Amino acid sequence: MNATVRWLVRRLLLTVLVTAGAATVAFAGMRLTPGDPVRTLLGSPPTPELLRQVRHELGYDRPLLEQYGLFMGRLLRGDLGHSYQLQQPVARVIGDQLWATLELAAAGFLLAVTVATVLAVATAGRRPALRRLAVALELLAISTPSFWTGVLLLTFFAFRWQVFPVISGSGPQGLVLPAVALALSLVGVFAQVLREGLERALEEPFALTSRARGSGETAVRIRHALRHALIPMITLSGWCVGALLSGAVVIETIFSRQGLGRVMATAIAGRDLPVVTGVVVVSALAFSVINLAVDGLYRVVDPRLRGAAL
Amino acid sequence: MGLGRPLPSLALPAASLIAAAATACAPGGAAAGTADGHLVYATGLEPDCLDPQVSGLEVTALIDRSIFDSLVGMTPDGRFHPWLAERWTVSEDGRTYTFHLRSGVRFHDGTPLDAAAVKATLDHAVDPETKSRYAASLVRSYASAEVVAPRVVKVRLREPDASFLQALSTAHLGIQPTARLRGNAEALCGTPVGSGPFRFAGWTRGKQVVLTRNPGYSWGPGYAGHRGPAHLERLSIGFVPEGSVRLGALTAGQADMVDGVPTTNAASVRSSGRTRLLRADMPGAVFGIFLNGTRGVLADERVRTALMRAVDIDRLVESVYSGEYSRAWSPLSPATTGYSRATEGSWPYDPALSDRLLDQAGWTGRDSAGYRTKNGERLALRWPYMSKLMQDRRHVLAQGVQAHAKRVGIAVDLVNEDGGAMARDVLQGTMDLYSTSLARAEPDILRYYFARDRTPPKGGGNFFRLSDSRLDRLLRDAAATTDPAVRARHYAEVQDRLLRKALVVPLYVPVRLVGASTEVRGVRFDSHAYPLFYEARKGGGK
């Protein structure tokens, strides 16, 4: 028990560190790119008075280190700042868009896991022709960029057959195509990892034992082998938060969906620093928290890890 | 996999490949997906802020035009019409404008329009606190306004400014109610209140802005066919960043109008039985290349002229834009008052002349790549650009210019820069070539680009610190008089002088291409080539 508490404290501290690090990198990145950020922000050549005004308001006339200190101080208090371009608090900008991205990410993830599980259970270590086909298709899905699959999906299902809306609404109908496009980029990796895990588990003695007890092949796979094969999948799902978030940028743009990805893309192009750092901080936090949860889950699933201070 | 793929711009080439497929396939379903009386307009960019005096974006003007009324209306022929002001007078010295406001006008919040609102709006535009990104520069001659009577306002200018009425006619100078302007900036940006034919009904960020009809409206602009409420009940402006997806939305009947139709798809939109192509030439400065005549090799007028004559602009524009756009002869668009027809044909393609001029200028050597040299130095021109501003195949056009320049031995280095580096280049004038366009229904736009006091550090567009006293005087005098004949003569001389000194190479006249369902009728374009929805109808709607 003691080990678990120590592990948790360590991981929480690490989470804070990762988030602060990400915020620092975002801050530095936006400052080190060439050019005057205020001019970029204002677009067409601004008048000198406007330039002075905005520079002062955003604190750009202070020394860089002081700016960084103020920025981190505000962040510690949970204040993400105010978007100059959108005239809104960053927390609200993100809050308004967060749900749409979560919805997309969750739908894409669940779809990918479901399809991958079906594929793996159906083809691991049997039906060689089908297995080869599945592996080939997975490879194709991994290597096809999601902007291409997105465009193909739109062309057929929205432009030609009009089964789904071209401009994604907020309803479940509008979620289908974007979720499929996002899932396709993940399903290949998931299926390959699961299949390998399954194949390894099926060679274990416990699989033989349950077969000897007269269980059907599919039952052995689902009730026994799958549980073992899921462990690497849990690790992978921590990693794929990043893939989901970056995939959302492309998917949201192509499908004209609301969401954090599109906000981020617009903010980077317009050098809207508070929004960029805000999205980075929130993403880093989500990434760390989910990884923490995954590692916790790992300890639940695999009792051998409980004593270890990973 | 997905981790390192954050670039939406990557989607463009792939998306354009299927754009043809999108327009080619006629949808099976008969009826359009949108209801009668509800028009859906899809555009690429989303506004940052809907306060007309704050934002400088085109899409803001497009939306705000339906929410806000202006003091006067302007038609593409350059004439002004009464709107919120039923009449106005200009003082002898051109520095005082007196506007008499129409009675019975109410803002969407119920407050009546009065002279105080006009004064408050103009003060709001120039207040540094507002941080106006465009409106303030439109009325930089504004000094003060005085409420003479509840419906009479007197506006004083610092100097005579013939472009002032045009500035007032834009959506960027839409009139806002006084009480709102005292409120906070966030409300002004997020929930605009005007007196226009449509009321703001909601903004789902990342998706759309919805407007609903203002049923009490009875003060349409003087140029419109009626004065009463708009025909449409509802107007949605959706934000669809991908051009090919917008086109798909139109052909699938999920949008009634889409803007930014790529020229490559224009023919299919036109020939489809279910869609039409609407087009409007943009007024203002055409897309062209500005030549740095104040430093480097281009300080030699012969080299500038050589570059200008080396490019076969007719052929380039024809092939890059599939014949949809016309080549430009003047830095001013033909849709602008003051455009000089005399410029047409005055500087034809003549590579032999280019070769002669370059020889005379001493660029007689050739290096291994075939470029001209002088004292061992290659004749190279740096042309930085920002891909964001080179949409509409402008980068392809630029490559065409590069290829033509190479044929006479000029090396053009196209450099893709990010916003920061570009801003620095513009600020310091450290490039040889720079390309841009700017829409404004006023020849005074030339002052923005060429007057001595309009350098980028001062908020202008005189990128290369050109200082030509003849030009300055012509531009100043043209702005100081409202006599159309005098203005036309001055601006004609300005255009002639700019071309004769080869300070600008006009390339093409930007056009707004809007695809529309055949169900949509009554859309017209205002003098800034923005579609107007006030008189639009759809389907069997009233």
Image: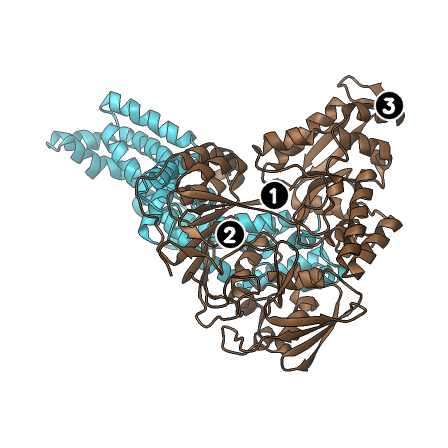
Are tags 2 and 3 found on a single chain? no
Looking at numbered disc 3 in the image, what kind of residue is underneath it? Asp
Say the numbered circle drawn on residue B542.
none
Q: Which residue is mark 3?
A: B359
Q: Where is the C terminus of chain B found, in terms of image quarters?
A: bottom left
The residue most toward the left is A214
Of callouts 1 and 3, the N-terminal one? 3
Q: Pick the residue in front: A41 or B21.
A: B21
Chain designation of label 1: B
Query: Chain A's shade in the image?
Result: cyan
Q: Which residue is mark 2?
A: A263
B324 on left or right of B401:
left
B151 on left or right of B191:
right
Q: Which residue is mark 1?
A: B388
Q: At x 74% / y 27%, what residue is drawn?
A: B405
Query: Chain B's shade in the image?
Result: brown
Chain designation of label 2: A
The percent coordinates of residue B12 (x first, y second) are: 51, 37
